[in-house]
C-alpha cells in the first residue's frame, strides 16, 4: 500500500465500522477515529510519511512487528498497546482491514457491558 492509499483506505475502513466518529482534537493534521468516545485509530503525516496508529493486543503487536516491516511500535503512543502502520508493499487492504477491526474491538471490549451491547451489531 502506498502513501496515498494508506490514509484513504484506513479512513474508509474505519468509517464502515458501526458507531465510528471522526474528529480532530489535536488539530487539523491528525484525524482521530473513536468508538464509544475512545480512540481506536489516528492518522497523520510526519516528515512526509503517512502513519496510521492503531490499538493492538500486546502479543499480536509483537508478532506483527516481526512479520511485517511496515508495522512499527506506536508513534507517540504507548508502545505496548499501539502500533503504527506505514506505507509498504507488505500492507494489503485485507491486513489493514483486520488491524482496524481488531483495534475497534479492543476499544469496545473495554467499555461497560451495556455500551458493548449497543455498539456491536448482532
Image: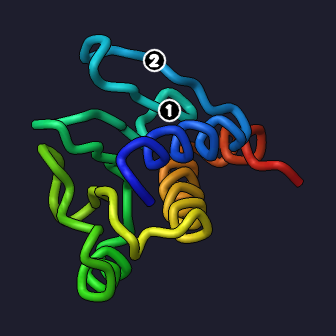
Labels 2 and 1: the sequence-earlier one = 2
- Image coordinates of residue 117 in percent, x first then y, are 76, 46
Callout count: 2
Q: Residue at x 41, y 36 (%)?
A: 39
Is 93 located above or below residue 53 in the figure?
below
Helix, strand or loop under label 1: strand
Q: Quadrant of residue 43?
A: top left
Left or right? Give the position of 57 relative to 66: right
Q: How is the image coloured?
A: rainbow
Residue at x-position 44% and y-position 34%: 38
**Residue 34 x/y as whole percent:** 50, 32
* Circle 2 SS class: strand
Whether label 2 touches label 1, CB < 8 Å: yes
Residue 51 visible from this viewpoint? yes
> Which quarter of the rendered picture does the C terminus lie within?
bottom right
Q: Which residue is mark 1?
A: 34
Camera-nearest label, 2 or 1: 2
Residue on which disc 2 sits: 23
Mark 2 Cα-neighbour bin, 10 Å: few <14, some 14–19, many ≥20: some
Q: Residue at x 10, y 37 (%)?
A: 47
CA distance separating discs 2 and 1: 8 Å
Amino acid at each position: 500500500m502506498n502513501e496515498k492509499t494508506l490514509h484513504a483506505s484506513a479512513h474508509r475502513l474505519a468509517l464502515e465500522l458501526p458507531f465510528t466518529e471522526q474528529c480532530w482534537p489535536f488539530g487539523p493534521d491528525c484525524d482521530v477515529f473513536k468508538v464509544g468516545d475512545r480512540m481506536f485509530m489516528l492518522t497523520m503525516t510526519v516528515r512526509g510519511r503517512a502513519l496510521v496508529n492503531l490499538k493492538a493486543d500486546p502479543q499480536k503487536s509483537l508478532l506483527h512487528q516481526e512479520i511485517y516491516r511496515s508495522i512499527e511500535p506506536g508513534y507517540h503512543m504507548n508502545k505496548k498497546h499501539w502500533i503504527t502502520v506505514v506505507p509498504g508493499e507488505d500492507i494489503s487492504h485485507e491486513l489493514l482491514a483486520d488491524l482496524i477491526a481488531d483495534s475497534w474491538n479492543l476499544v469496545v471490549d473495554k467499555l461497560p457491558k451495556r455500551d458493548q451491547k449497543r455498539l456491536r451489531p448482532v
